[in-house]
């Protein structure tokens, strides 16, 4: 929650959407008495992320050469 700066409710909704879309695998369990949720990127999630990163790189353009 702290890393992505979302409330617990917002993060839960996003995890549900990503899980339902097949982009992440969601596993719930406990560590001691505390509930925990583990997320793993699926093959479809990796492909979608790679596509988004390619798009961002295309928009940003190649890095400029260092004049030094």
Image (tube, rainbow, N blue to C red):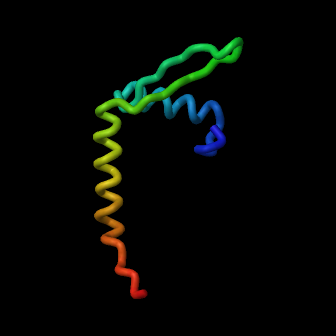
Q: Residue furthest right?
A: 33
Residue 7 screen position, x and y as percent:
65, 37
Q: Residue furthest front?
A: 68
Q: Which residue sits at x=63%, y=45%?
A: 5
On the picture, is 5 further left or further right than 57?
Answer: right
The answer to whether residue 17 is above or below residue 48 is above
Residue 2 screen position, x and y as percent:
66, 42
Q: Quadrant of the C terminus?
A: bottom left
Residue 19 screen position, x and y as percent:
42, 26
Foreground of the two, 10 or 45: 45
On the picture, is 60 further left or further right than 3?
Answer: left
Foreground of the two, 28 or 16: 28
Residue 10 screen position, x and y as percent:
58, 35
Quarter of the rendering containing residue 4: top right
Q: Quadrant of the N terminus?
A: top right
Q: Which residue sits at x=57%, y=34%?
A: 11
Q: Which residue sits at x=53%, y=30%?
A: 13
The count of marks equals: 0
The answer to whether residue 64 is above or below residue 53 is below
Q: Residue furthest bottom?
A: 67
């Amino acid at each position: 929650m702290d890393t992505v700066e979302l409330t617990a409710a917002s993060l839960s909704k996003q995890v549900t959407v990503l899980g339902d879309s097949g982009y992440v695998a969601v596993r719930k369990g406990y560590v001691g008495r505390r509930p925990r949720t583990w997320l793993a990127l699926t093959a479809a999630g990796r492909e979608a992320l790679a596509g988004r990163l390619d798009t961002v790189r295309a928009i940003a353009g190649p890095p400029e050469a260092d004049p030094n």
